Image: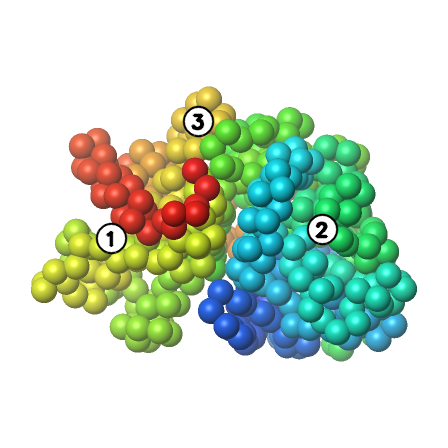
Amino acid sequence: MARHLLAIDQGTTGSTVVVLSDDAVVRGRATREFSQHFPEPGLVEHDVEEIWSSVTEALADALQQAGVRSQDCAGIGITNQRETTVLWERKSGRSLHRAIVWQDRRTSARCAELREQGLGPLFAARTGLLLDPYFSGTKLEWLLDHVPDARRRALAGELAFGTIDSFLVQRLSAGALHITDVTNASRTLLFDIHRAQWDDELLRHLRVPRSLLPEVRSCSEVYGLTRGVPGLADGIPIAGIAGDQQAALFGQTCFGLGEAKCTYGTGAFLLMNTGEHAMVSKRGLLTTIAWRIGGKTTYALEGSSFVAGSAVQWLRDQLGIIKSAAEVEPLARKVDSSGGVTFVPALTGLGAPYWDADARGLITGLTRGSSAAHLARATLEGIAFQIADLVSAMAEDAGHPLTRLRVDGGACQNELLMQFQSDLLDAAIDRPTNIETTALGAAYLAGLATGVFPEASAIARVHQLDKTWQPRMEKSARQAHLARWKDAVSRARSRQGEP
């Protein structure tokens, strides 16, 4: 019996493929980056053909590195950047426009218009989301309105919509499948998370034809088989799908009520398992589906920070004060503190708990003595401050403090950041041995569907911790840091931002 699993982790800046053994050991791993397109300020797009090429190249490299034949893999799990929106021709599979990325803010005015119409409570009640350009629904509406002839063709049944998971499954199956899973569907503003189905009233408000939509499936089942994929054998089961943050929650084995993780990637995302209860936040967090397996739906509270690792990329690409992301920690360690410099990394607006699409990045506290090292340290602190805001909101919603947080994503390797995070939260931080937890989650879901893992408890047994950070900052120092941050955020926010 094949005991290896393939996980495709299609992210915002690159695609990673992991070959995982049944004892949760990564046997092969490959990443391919692709271009980011910024047509105008606030607009972010991806070329889906570049994405597909990055996936197929990473698949070939990961299998070669692992020394595993694709036909010896039991199944493929897919995890993806969520909310990113693709519109393609059903017949050819050709995209009509570049994908509109989750970070894109072009529909800010449309979201404001919908809120002014009093529709915010309806969308929140049905979807667990806020009317924000972050989500897929208004992006899809924009495509239908701005791509020539798109709306007519959509009504004629010629076009298909999907998030990146749907696009990948369509390509992996040679066009045989047009599906998504409940986690990605729950991020579209079009899906009732309580009834687990597309909502006709929401579709009507966003003027989206139902004929565009994929079939919604669970997170762990055999959806279909591969066919015609370069470098892959035909007939491999496509068996797991989850949005990247839900996959990371599953990959961190946060199977119990109240267990939480934070992924530090391009953005940073905090999720807490709330069990079978779709908890409604009073503090700007989102209610979302964590996963659906075997007919049972598990929910989560989520807080998102739009800019985390991309703040470090900004230091590298726009300011040029570092040549690689890995240089930011040694540079920040050249000083003992940020020297009063505070960086609010609202480069694409502010997410939870503020939801201010018009907020802008801000650096305060500069003096003649401020250096690149102070700014590097302030950047890492800005990432941690955003997570502290999310944890505070989540603790208030849940009615109890968060005393332990599991972390993953590339930036969790930054030990200066992790210690400061632990200090701000006054909580332990656990980092697993394998920080590829997004890919792990996708592989685990595929493994459950194909029998590689008989049950979730078998997955929990192979999960191992690498390091734990404990808080060591005095309460008064913590409070001073948080006060400095609150002041800077108040300056960065727009007058139009929601409370």
Q: CA distance from mark 1 to mark 2?
A: 39 Å
Residue at 47%, 52% in the rendered image: 357
Confirm whether residue 60 shows in the render. Answer: no
Q: What is the number of the mark on residue 396? A: 3
Residue 462, quarter of the rendered image: top right
Q: Which of the labelled discs sits on residue 342, or is there none?
A: 1
The location of residue 384, given as percent across then percent down, is 34, 47
Q: Outermost residue, top direction?
A: 399
Describe residue 93's horizontal placement relative to residue 80 as left or right.
right
Tag 1: residue type? Thr
In the picture shown, does residue 202 fall above or below 169? above
Q: Secondary structure at mark 2?
A: loop
Q: CA distance from mark 3 to mark 1?
A: 25 Å
- Most extreme residue toward the right is 156
Q: Residue at x 72, y 33 (%)?
A: 194
- The mark that comes first in sequence, 1 or 2, is 2
The amino acid type found where label 3 is placed reads: Glu
Tell whether 336 sits left or right of 185.
left
Q: Residues within 10 Å of mark 3 (few under 14, many from 20)?
A: some
Cα separation, mark 3 vs mark 2, equals 33 Å
Q: Position of residue 144 (x, y in %)?
A: 73, 64
Q: Nearer the viewer, residue 100 or 238?
A: 100
Dividing the image into 4 quarters, which one contains the C terminus?
A: top left
Q: Which residue in the protein does label 2 denote?
A: 206
